[in-house]
Structure formats: structure tokens, C-alpha cells
Image: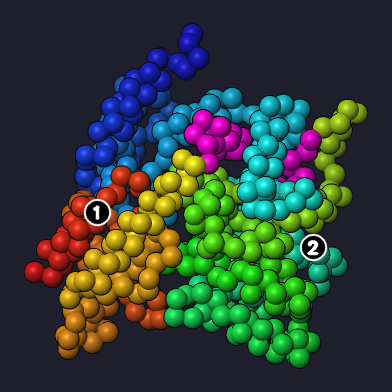
């Protein structure tokens, strides 16, 4: 028998190859209401399998045609990138070998590859040899790891009654969720105001800290942003670090989106000071074009991570006489995929400049779009984008429409454009105003695509 039964592997791979080759030219979405998709897949599971042909047919007739087409240059949806085909291939290697990174005995090569990747990237961050990190399933878990390390440092006895988590108004929602998981009282999760460019205000941060300390509370961690979810805005990391270090507060930088700029010399000014942070989240499955899930958590001092779980015992695992590497001791996971391999492999094959060029190009395209919006009498941008996410809305100059009416128009515009299958964008609310949001993650998105998006918005929504 072949490695994969029934030879379905080659059939599926051929189909996928054909689909991906043509994907750039195809619609972003062939919209079908959910109940119609459900009709096609429900009730297919039974005691007797339907056979590989039935499965093949589902992939060919339902999954491929009706899934979001991230390879389309008109896909500007959420921060999920079109994956590098090589990374998808390496993902297949990872799944096929199924090396678990619990202890090096279970993954003699992949464990070392994760360590190599982390070590290479800590140097790119500008950390010294005391630093470390671990591959995670994504930004939410990396942010949780930051909280775990800070909590372990400041509250080793687990009495969290006075513990306060500080986060910008523009934080990703995982910060609040994690604070809840970490046992922080909800009234002790304090939001720090941002300025008109959605950057955390250092002056407001310091005022809040002084006020909290006067009430005998202990703010112990500040989550700063390097690439906010809504607008890809970057906090002034150096200024925030001055304040957190003065008041003995852990600084975690949520760089899930923007941390990839450690690979770009031309854009590294946006993350200046990142190497001063106590810990950092950076996602491979966002701007490094990796299939999910692939996030990374970095710490300035590896001991702060190691000490979190060092005294945890699991005799069935940690029982070797020879020196073994126990990555599970620095992770919230036990079984852990060798996801490091896909990023390590792409960096090996392509080098860091390959990624840097893409960021510079995507930023240039985002700025082009911003300029087009500014030139238009119909649209306005929320701010000047620092990287590759731009928020904008239909708001004709001189019109008497109220913000409430404009909110409704823009809200409906998103669905109309997306359901047309010609483009995909998202929306968000900033200061109670609904904005359309375009995330440029596809290096094949060009100026023509962006002009096309504006004309689509016009023709689908406003005429
Ligand atoms: C800034 C930021 N942090 C964290 C996350 C959460 O990452 P994940 O979806 O990988 O858990 C996101 C996701 O959009 C994000 O934009």
C-alpha cells in the first residue's frame, strides 16, 4: 500500500495545484448563503465511508469553489495572508512527519530547528544572548505567554487582588480575554487612551500608573502595540519603555502584525526600541505569509520564561539520563507541531530580503491607496497608514449626511462589495465611526486593483 491510501494524495495535490495556479484570476468569493453550503455538506458522515471519490468531489465542488480566495489580488480582508506555496508544502512535511516538540527525543531534528529559528529572530529583534522564545499557535497565545511571565515575576504567590493590566484602547481583544484567563479582576484591566493616529499616549500612560499606585494597586504589565489590528499603527516603544521601566512594569509588545518588520532595514524605524521590551509577540501567519497557526513569543531574558514552569514534573516525559531539550517546559502546550520548520525553511530558501521587499511594496501600495482616497471627493481616510492596513469611509465632501447615516451606508457597503465576489474588505469602528478596512497582504495587489476597489465601492454601494 502507498503511504497515502487509494492514491488520493496525488489527485488532491493535482487539483490543488490547478486551483492555486488559476486562483489569481478567479473571483475572491463565489458567495453562497451559509444554509446552501450547509445543505451540501450535512449528513455526509456515516458508519460506512462514502469513499475517496466522494471526498474528492466535495473538495472539487464545494471547498475549493466556495472558500475565500486569498490568492486574489482583490483580497484585502482580515490579516490572513496568501500563503507562500513553499510554506504550504513544508506544512505538508510537518503534518506527515508529525514530530511533536514536547521533548527532543520525540523530535530530534525539528526541536533544533525551532531553536535555530528563535535564535536567528532574537538577533533580528536586537536582543542579546540571554534572550529566548518559543513558537506558539498565534498572537493570542503569545500575548498570554507575556502575561504568564509577568505574573510569575510580580505575583509568584498568585495573590492577584491588586494586580492591574494596562493596555491601549487599540489593543487586540485577546489582551482582555487573556487577562480574564489569567485571573485579573475585570475592573483592573485599564485601557490607556490613544492619540488621533491610534498610538498609545505615553503621557496618559504615566498619569494612569501614578494614579493606580496612589490607590495601592500594582500595574504589572503594559501591552504596547507594534501594528494595531485596526490601522497598523505603531506605538512609540522607546517612550513607553522609559515609563514602564521607571515604574517597574513588564513591557510586552504585541507585534503580532508589525513585528515582521524586524526583517526590513528600510522600515525598522517603526519598531525602534522593540529590543527594550521584556517580551514580544510576532506572528508568522500574518505578515510572514505562513499557513496558520504559527506565532512566536520572545523574551529578553530566557530565565523569565523558564522559571514559569520549571518545577512542573511529568515523569513519563522528563525522565532521561542524557541531556534532552524540553521545549514543552517553555510552552503552554504539550503536543506541539513543528511549525517553526515552515518559516525556517522559507527563510533558508529565500532569505530575509525577500520578505523585506514585500513589506516595502505593500506599504507603498497602501500609501498609494491613501492618496487616491484623499484625491476623491467621496471618500476619507481615518489616518495616514504607517504600514499596510488602511481605514476609510464613504463620506462625500460637503454632504449633509449625519455620522449615523454614514455609518449605515458604510456598514452595508462592506457586504455588498464582498458578496459581489469582486473584492474582499472588512470594517471596524474607530471612535464610534464605522470605517471600511483594507489590509494589503497580497504582493500581487497593484495600483490598478486599488483603483478598481474604489470604483467597485462606488458602483455597488452608491448608485
Ligand atoms: C495586533 C494583534 N495581536 C494579536 C492578534 C491575535 O492573533 P491570533 O489570531 O494569531 O491569535 C491579532 C489578530 O488579528 C492582532 O492583530
Q: Residue at 16% across / 85% down in the picture?
A: 399
The answer to whether the residue bearing label 2 lies less than 8 angstroms from the nearest atom of ligand 1 is no
Which sits in the foreground, 449 or 406?
A: 449
| Above or below: residue 432 compared with residue 229 | below
- In the rendered image, the vertical position of residue 92 relative to residue 453, given as above or below: above
Q: Position of residue 254 (x, y in %)?
A: 58, 62
Residue 386 seen = yes
Residue designated by label 1? 447
Q: Is residue 202 magenta?
A: no
Magenta residues, start to end: 325-352
* Residue positioned most to the top: 1
Is the residue under label 2 in contact with that under label 1 (CB below 8 Å)?
no
Q: Nearer the viewer, mark 1 or mark 2?
A: 1
In the image, 361 versus 85, the foreground residue is: 361
- Tell me the tag on residue 152: 2
Residue situated in front as seen by the camera: 442 or 421: 442
Q: Position of residue 84 (x, y in %)?
A: 42, 37
Q: Which residue is at a point 63% across and 74% down the rendered structure image?
A: 239
| Disc on the earlier residue, 1 or 2 | 2
Amino acid at each position: 500500500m502507498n503511504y497515502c491510501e487509494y492514491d488520493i494524495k496525488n489527485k488532491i495535490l493535482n487539483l490543488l495545484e490547478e486551483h492555486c495556479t488559476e486562483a489569481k484570476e478567479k473571483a475572491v468569493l463565489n458567495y453562497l448563503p451559509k444554509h446552501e453550503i450547509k445543505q451540501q455538506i450535512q449528513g455526509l458522515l456515516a458508519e460506512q465511508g462514502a469513499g475517496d471519490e466522494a471526498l474528492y468531489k466535495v473538495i472539487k465542488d464545494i471547498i475549493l469553489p466556495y472558500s475565500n480566495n486569498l490568492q486574489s489580488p482583490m483580497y484585502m480582508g482580515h490579516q490572513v495572508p496568501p500563503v507562500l506555496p513553499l510554506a504550504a508544502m513544508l506544512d505538508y512535511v510537518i503534518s506527515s512527519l508529525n514530530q511533536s516538540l514536547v521533548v527532543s527525543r520525540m523530535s530530534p531534528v525539528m526541536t533544533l530547528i525551532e531553536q535555530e529559528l528563535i535564535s536567528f529572530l532574537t538577533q533580528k529583534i536586537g536582543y542579546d544572548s540571554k534572550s529566548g522564545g518559543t513558537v506558539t499557535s498565534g498572537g493570542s497565545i503569545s500575548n498570554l505567554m507575556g502575561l504568564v511571565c509577568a505574573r510569575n515575576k510580580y505575583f509568584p504567590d498568585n495573590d492577584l487582588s491588586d494586580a492591574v493590566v494596562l493596555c491601549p484602547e487599540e489593543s487586540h481583544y485577546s489582551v482582555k480575554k487573556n487577562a480574564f484567563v489569567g485571573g485579573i479582576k475585570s475592573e483592573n484591566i485599564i485601557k490607556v487612551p490613544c492619540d488621533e493616529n491610534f498610538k498609545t499616549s505615553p503621557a496618559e500612560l504615566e498619569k494612569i500608573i501614578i494614579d493606580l499606585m496612589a490607590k495601592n494597586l500594582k500595574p504589572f504589565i503594559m501591552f504596547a502595540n507594534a501594528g494595531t489590528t485596526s490601522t497598523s499603527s505603531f506605538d512609540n516603544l522607546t517612550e513607553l519603555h522609559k515609563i514602564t521601566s521607571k515604574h517597574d512594569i513588564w513591557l510586552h509588545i504585541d507585534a503580532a502584525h508589525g513585528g515582521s518588520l524586524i526583517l526590513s532595514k528600510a522600515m525598522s524605524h517603526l519598531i525602534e526600541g522593540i529590543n527594550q521590551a521584556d517580551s514580544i509577540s510576532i506572528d508568522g501567519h500574518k505578515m510572514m505569509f505562513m499557513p496558520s497557526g504559527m506565532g512566536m513569543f520572545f523574551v529578553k531574558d530566557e530565565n523569565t520564561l523558564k522559571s514559569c514552569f520549571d518545577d512542573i514534573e511529568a515523569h513519563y516525559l522528563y525522565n532521561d539520563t542524557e541531556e534532552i531539550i524540553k521545549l514543552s517546559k517553555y510552552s503552554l502546550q504539550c503536543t506541539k507541531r513543528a511549525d517553526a520548520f515552515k518559516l525556517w525553511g522559507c527563510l533558508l530558501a529565500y532569505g530575509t530580503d525577500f520578505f523585506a521587499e514585500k513589506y516595502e511594496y505593500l506599504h507603498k501600495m497602501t500609501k498609494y491607496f491613501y492618496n487616491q482616497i484623499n484625491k476623491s471627493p467621496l471618500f476619507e481616510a481615518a489616518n495616514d497608514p504607517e504600514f499596510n492596513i488602511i481605514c476609510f469611509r464613504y463620506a462625500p465632501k460637503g454632504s449633509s449626511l449625519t455620522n449615523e447615516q454614514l455609518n449605515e451606508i458604510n456598514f452595508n457597503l462592506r457586504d455588498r462589495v464582498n458578496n459581489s465576489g469582486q473584492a474582499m474588505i472588512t470594517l471596524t469602528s474607530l471612535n464610534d465611526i464605522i470605517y471600511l478596512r483594507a489590509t494589503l497582504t497580497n504582493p500581487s495587489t497593484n495600483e490598478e486593483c486599488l483603483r478598481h476597489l474604489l470604483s467597485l465601492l462606488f458602483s455597488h454601494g452608491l448608485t
